[in-house]
Image (spheres, coloured by chain):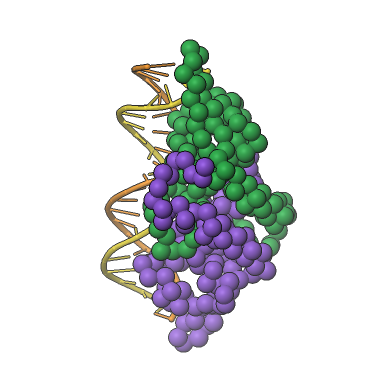
Chain colours: A green, B purple, C yellow, D orange
Amino acid sequence: MRKQRHTFYGNCPVEAALDIIGGKWKAILLFHILDGTKRFNELGRLLPGLTPRMLTTQLRELEADGVITRTIYPQVPPKVEYSITPFGRTLQPLLQELAAWSETHVKPRLEHTSSAGSPES
Amino acid sequence: MRKQRHTFYGNCPVEAALDIIGGKWKAILLFHILDGTKRFNELGRLLPGLTPRMLTTQLRELEADGVITRTIYPQVPPKVEYSITPFGRTLQPLLQELAAWSETHVKPRLEHTSSAGSPES
DNA sequence: CCGAATCCTGCACGATACTG
DNA sequence: CAGTATCGTGCAGGATTCGG
């Protein structure tokens, strides 16, 4: 994602939405932050395999999209918290339905590994 | 997209859904095919700027995901039609909500061209 | 402890030409 | 008409290192 930014999508509006939640870790990050304000390393601990670099990148993009807020506490032990914005909150139902759809329709197909439409190449 | 295929997503289910509709032209293609069976060049004509190569690729991936069906008519003038599968049909409401969300929440923000970092007060 | 800066790699995406 | 074959590009994603 982040190919073109959603300056304006001659394609279809869906692109704009995908551009926001389509990052590699965006969705899962949003789930966690939606669940409550989180600190940087806290998120890192929740997502093993996610490097600080990627964490920073994804969080910054979410922030740039106005989905989350970055609060810096100028303390001796640096402390940064990420919380959801009202705008980001509007994504919640959408993400849940997306997840629900996967659970309902995609997951069963993977388990069957059957002929249903010939998954995998 | 198509980085890992949704073999199984240790991440979150949303990834699986995004993997299916997250292609550059997937969503818009689905909208058209959802609207009715379409032929190859017909889709090409609907999507100016989309090369045959990309059209083939995207359609093939959608087919592999069991979202659409590719019907070949062994005629003198080759004819291939793409239609939605029942499984693909289940995506319709999801796509519509995705689009609706963009229209409602994203589009206004772009028009204002205002402070993209701190939305609504 | 929380990042920024730099460098690198691989795939998604794309342009162009050719074929049954 | 409906693709394939070939080649090229840019950006998302990632490892590593440095700074405050």
Q: Residue sitting at 43 percent across and 44 percent down?
A: B116
Residue found at the far bottom of this picture: B76
- The relative height of residue A29 versus residue A91 in the rendered view (above or below) is above
Q: Residue at x 43, y 74 (%)?
A: B46
Asked if one can make out residue A60 in the rendered structure from this viewpoint, the answer is yes
Left or right: residue B116 versus residue B98 is: left
> Is residue B119 positioned above or below D19 on the image?
below
Marker count (numbered): 0
Does residue A67 appear anywhere in the picture? no
Image location of residue A45, percent across then percent down: 59, 26
Whole-percent x and y of residue C20? 42, 77
Residue A76 against residue B24 in the figure, above or below? above
- Horizontally, residue A71 falls left or right of residue B69, namely left
Name the spot of residue B26 as percent of width and height, x first: 50, 62
Residue A14 in the image: state x and y as whole percent: 51, 59
At x 64%, y 63%, the residue is: B93
Q: Residue furthest top?
A: A76
- Residue A19, compared with residue B89, is above or below; it is above
Position of the C terminus of chain A, as image quadrant, is bottom right
Q: Decide which of C6, B55 is in the foreground and name it.
A: C6
Q: Residue at x 65, y 50 (%)?
A: A93
